[in-house]
Image: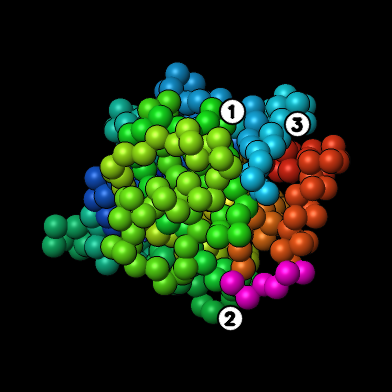
């Protein structure tokens, strides 16, 4: 089989790239090693930047995010027992974020791909990439015991942090930068009304907490936990009790609890691989970089990579000129490092660092006070949170 672009991974970046290319008449295949149910059951991001929503519109999948997504004009920061609102809309010149689950983005894109009749392979085993130092790369995989080989012009590595694409690049050709944080996030999804209309990011002596949501009747909450915490030691009751302790009194009183419908622990990491192009292999999304989730940037960064990469492929097939493909890596990385900075900053500001002393804690509090008192500082938070332009 032959296609123009072979896409590895059916997460948000692979599916969105496939959809944008498909609409431009470029032939693609998407190859995913997990099942469709597994991909759709993975609870992850919930906050979309305005630019991400616009890209979904451009991909022809904007209807449901507009109908069902919750537009948020602000967030709340909670510390010292009180909540303080950051007016994202007012401080960013009228921009907003939309609360809409990654699972729903993925579902919309999978449906669009199916309607378009474009190929999407699930449960592909032994996926491997070959010849990307040449103009004739290929992808091999096993499906139902049968070995397949796809010949293509380009491979898009959209296979996440643990994927095969980045790992297939010779170590001498790639530079990585990493920071692993000494804590994780324990997340709970529950069919209970959210504690507040807007997201609450809480800094507390016991650790960070985040109150988010998926709809008016479904909540998503996170608490900072030890990195080696065992999930089965956290009963629902223990989770709710700990969350309540980290919120202000009013939020703690208002919190509606119920059985968890999903519970998981995520490690926190900052990671960047440079460059993002190796011959005819291009990396996008978590395959190339990871941000700690505090700034809600991971999925949005995957979307901006896909914007640059899809435009570059489209320009190449329209003009046969490689200019945009050649600048893809540098252009994407410039925005990646900005999002890395913001995510690292917000993580450092809001979490309890196990070995930090009173100086670091006072720095956090001083920075929070400054944020609230200075329009310049809160504007900087707002413009990064709603998303830098791309
Ligand atoms: P992935 O979603 O990881 O998709 C990669 C796909 O490739 C997967 O389906 C995987 O199964 C597949 N794959 C892997 N290896 C292979 C292989 N060998 N062959 C074929 N397929 C393969 N981001 C935000 O923007 N906002 C948020 O609010 C937010 N919150 C988050 C909360 C949590 C708890 C976590 C863990 C993450 C959060 N993120 C958030 C980050 C966001 O979920 C990721 O950045 C996003 O999923 C990246 O998309 P992707 O398509 O690049 O990678
Ligand atoms: C969610 C996750 C985040 O990392 C964040 O900053 C905000 C919201 C969420 O899953 O809803």
Which secondary structure lies at badge 2? Answer: helix
Which secondary structure lies at badge 1? Answer: strand
* Label 2 Cα crowd, 10 Å radius (few <14 / some 14-19 / many 20+): few
Residue 44: image location, x then y, percent? 42, 47
Q: Say which of 315 and 303 sits in front.
A: 303
Quadrant (top left, top right, bottom left, bottom right) of the C terminus: top right
For residue 314, what is the image quadrant?
Answer: top right
Task: Determine which of the numbered discs, if any, sits on residue 72 in the image.
Answer: 1
The residue sitting at 23% across, 55% down in the picture is 123
Give the magenta range: 354-359
Q: Decide which of tag 3 and tag 2 comes sooner along the chain.
A: 3
Residue 386 vertical placement versus 238 (above, below):
above
Residue 311 vertical placement versus 126 (above, below):
above
* Label 3 Cα crowd, 10 Å radius (few <14 / some 14-19 / many 20+): many
In the drawing, does residue 203 fall left or right of residue 299? right
The residue singled out by tag 2 in the image is: 172
Total of numbered circles in the picture? 3
For residue 40, what is the image quadrant?
Answer: top left
The residue singled out by tag 3 in the image is: 92
The residue sitting at 59% across, 75% down in the picture is 173
Ligand 1 within 8 Å, label 2 CB: no
Q: Does the CB distance between marks 1 and 2 fall below 8 Å?
A: no
Residue 299: image location, x then y, percent? 52, 46
Q: CA distance from mark 3 to mark 2?
A: 42 Å
Residue 322: image location, x then y, percent? 63, 51
Magenta span main SS:
loop
In the drawing, does residue 301 fall left or right of residue 373? left
Q: CA distance from mark 1 to mark 3?
A: 13 Å
In the drawing, does residue 259 fall left or right of residue 71? left
Ligand 2 within 8 Å, label 3 CB: no
């Amino acid at each position: 089989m032959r296609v123009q672009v072979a896409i590895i991974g059916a997460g948000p970046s692979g599916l969105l790239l496939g959809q944008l290319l498909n609409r431009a008449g470029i032939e693609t295949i998407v190859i995913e090693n997990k099942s469709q149910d597994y991909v759709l059951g993975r609870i992850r991001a919930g906050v979309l930047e305005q630019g991400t929503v616009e890209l979904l519109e451009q991909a022809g999948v904007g209807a449901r995010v507009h109908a069902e997504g919750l537009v948020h004009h602000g967030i709340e920061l909670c510390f010292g027992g009180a909540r303080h609102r950051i007016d994202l809309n007012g401080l960013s010149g009228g921009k907003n974020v939309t609360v809409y689950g990654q699972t729903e983005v993925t579902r919309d894109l999978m449906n669009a791909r199916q309607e378009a009749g474009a190929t999407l392979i699930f449960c592909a085993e032994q996926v491997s990439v070959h010849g990307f130092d040449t103009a004739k790369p290929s992808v091999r995989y096993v499906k139902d015991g049968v070995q397949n080989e796809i010949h293509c012009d380009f491979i898009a590595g959209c296979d996440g942090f643990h994927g095969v694409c980045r790992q297939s690049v010779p170590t001498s050709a790639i530079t990585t930068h990493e920071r692993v944080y000494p804590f994780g996030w324990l997340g709970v999804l529950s069919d209970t009304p959210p504690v507040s209309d807007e997201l609450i990011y809480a800094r507390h002596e016991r650790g960070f907490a985040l109150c988010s949501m998926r709809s008016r009747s479904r909540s998503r909450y996170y608490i900072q936990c030890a990195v080696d915490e065992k999930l089965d030691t956290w009963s629902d009751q223990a989770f709710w009790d700990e969350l309540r302790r980290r919120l202000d009194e009013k939020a703690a009183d208002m919190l509606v609890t119920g059985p968890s419908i999903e519970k998981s622990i995520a490690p926190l990491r900052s990671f960047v691989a440079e460059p993002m192009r190796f011959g005819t292999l291009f990396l996008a999304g978590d395959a190339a970089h990871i941000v700690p989730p505090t700034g809600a940037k991971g999925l949005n960064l995957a979307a901006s990579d896909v914007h640059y990469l899809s435009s570059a492929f489209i320009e190449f097939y329209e003009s046969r000129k490689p200019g945009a493909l050649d600048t893809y890596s540098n252009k994407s990385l410039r925005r990646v490092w900005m999002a890395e900075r913001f995510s690292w900053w917000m993580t450092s500001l809001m979490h309890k660092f196990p070995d930090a002393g009173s100086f670091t804690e006072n720095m956090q509090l001083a920075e929070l006070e400054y944020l609230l008192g200075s329009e310049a500082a809160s504007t900087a938070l707002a413009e990064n949170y709603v998303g830098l332009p791309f």
